[in-house]
Image (cartoon, helix red, strand yellow):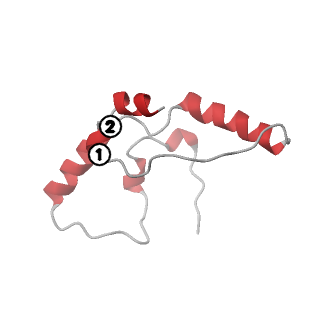
Amino acid sequence: MSRTIDKADWHPASWQSRPAAQQASYPDQAALDRAVSDLSRLPPIVTSWEVDGLRDLIAKAQRGEAFVLQGGDCAETFDECTSENIVAKL
């Protein structure tokens, strides 16, 4: 059953208060805390202006004014996930 989330209720850690139907078991809480801390310091996967731009481009494709070609690097390590590396790939 899906639950509608009010935008006012959302924040980066709000997922932690939601029930998880299929949650992995993490026996080492300290390691989990370190991993969450490491991930919290990484840059966002996409920016808000990139989302807005993509929305506009997809609308153009929907109107038949453009087409969508998807590609990307989905095999980078967390160490490679820096703003500098992302910009260099773009």
Does 54 appear above or below 25? above
What amino acid does circle 1 point to? Answer: Phe
Is mark 2 in CB contact (under 8 Å) with mark 1?
yes
Which SS class for mark 2?
loop
Look at 72% across and 41% down and name the residue there: 58
Which SS class for mark 1?
helix
First reached walking from the N terminus: tag 2 or tag 1: 2
Q: Name the residue under label 2.
A: 42
What amino acid does circle 2 point to? Answer: Leu
Please state, as top left, top right, bottom left or bottom right, where the N terminus lies in the image.
Answer: bottom right
The image position of residue 57, as x and y in percent, is 71, 36
Does 28 appear above or below 6? below
The image position of residue 62, as x and y in percent, is 81, 44
Q: Distance between the residues labelled 2 and 1?
A: 8 Å
Q: Mark 1 points at which residue?
A: 78
Label 2 vs label 1, nearer the camera: 1
Whether residue 58 sits left or right of residue 74 in the image: it is right
Does 46 appear above or below 14? above
Residue 52, image quadrant? top right
Look at 15% across and 63% down and name the residue there: 28
